[in-house]
Image (tube, helix red, strand yellow):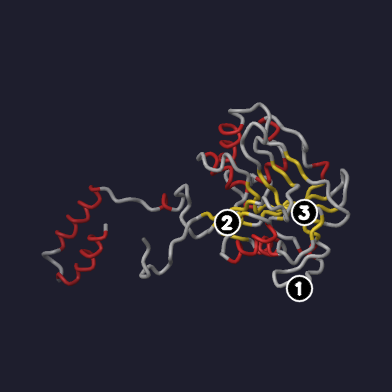
Amino acid sequence: MSSEFNPVQVREKYADFNGKIKEQMPSLLADARYPMFTRELAEQRVQGRGIGRYVDTGDLVTYNGKGDNQEIRFILTANRQGLTETGRFALGLINPHSDYVNGALNLTKAKDAQGKDVNGAYEAISGSGVIAVKRKDLGIIGARMTQEQVLNHKGWRMLLRHPDEVPKELAEDFEGAKEYIGKVVFSKYDQAMGMFPSDGETVPTLRAWFVSRLDDCSRSNAGGRCGLDNDNGCSVGVAPEAPNALDTNVQQVKAYSPADLATFDNAVRGLEGVLNPALLRPFQQLRSKL
């Protein structure tokens, strides 16, 4: 049980926001969370969590045009420290006031959380974490892939934060992604992890990448056809200040061994005969907490 004497109340790292993403996103952001990104989901699945569910991620995608030359932009909205400035802007457009076409946010009729028009929204989504690629250059789409194809797939490498594909401030160690790809997914399947983007609309649009279940049917596919007005939306809000479920924050705190404490005690006893006892009192109080 927590206490009012704690200067900062500890809260759970993850919270589910189920339902239409356009309705849930304002609540997620108001709770000072960011939507879990794909690399984090892969990490959780290595630990055996989130295997049987899909997640609408915080990795967004915009479409402009159609055909092979269609511009597809990946928007990585957050890193482990929280939302980027561009990410906060783009996610903020996902709200009940904006206009939607076939489940996609119509960027020519976007509105902010207060219902005010946001002109030039497509062009305004720019900066760090916004990576543009032509549809024809994305790699294999619309089909399951082999492990080697996934490891070399531009789209999946961006979603999994390969240092060669994304800005430094958003990059992750790719060895963790390889563990998910090789040990978790392709230890079960010969082909999996297809990437299925939208065909686009007649206007620039925005959607969210979702990663499907890791089962015989879905096989951890990445879908860029997510309907932001779908009742079955499932976003996971992450509190960046809370301890990580993998204890990555806790691991930085080194525990003291009995030998360490004995060394401390011996040092203090050696000072008792030469220092004013009042000077040693803070050290004795510290020792009581170790």
Q: Residue at x 71, y 61 (%)?
A: 94
Q: Name the mark nearer the viewer: 3 or 1.
A: 3
Quadrant assignment, res 119: bottom right
Residue extending farthest to the front is 231
First along the sequence among labels 3 and 2: 3
**Residue 210 visible here:** yes
Element marked by disc 2:
strand
Q: What residue is disc 1 on?
A: 116
Q: Which quadrant of the figure contains the N terminus?
A: bottom left
Element marked by disc 1:
loop
- Give the camera-side residue of 216 and 244: 216
Q: Which quadrant of the figure contains the C terminus?
A: bottom left
Is there a contact, CB below 8 Å, between mark 3 and mark 2? no
- Give the camera-side residue of 108 and 123: 108
Q: Reply above or below: 180 against 10.
A: above
Residue 273: image location, x then y, percent? 11, 64
Mark-to-mark CA distance, 3 and 2: 21 Å
Three-letter amino acid code at disc 2?
Gly
**Residue 131 visible here:** no
Residue 167: image location, x then y, percent? 66, 52
Three-letter amino acid code at disc 1?
Lys
Mark-to-mark CA distance, 3 and 1: 20 Å
Mark-to-mark CA distance, 2 and 1: 25 Å
Q: What residue is disc 3 on?
A: 103
Q: What residue is disc 2 on?
A: 237
* Other residues around mark 2 within 10 Å, as few (<14) / some (14–19) / many (≥20): many
- Give the camera-side residue of 33 and 273: 33
Is there a contact, CB below 8 Å, between mark 2 and mark 1? no
Q: Reply above or below: 249 against 211.
A: below
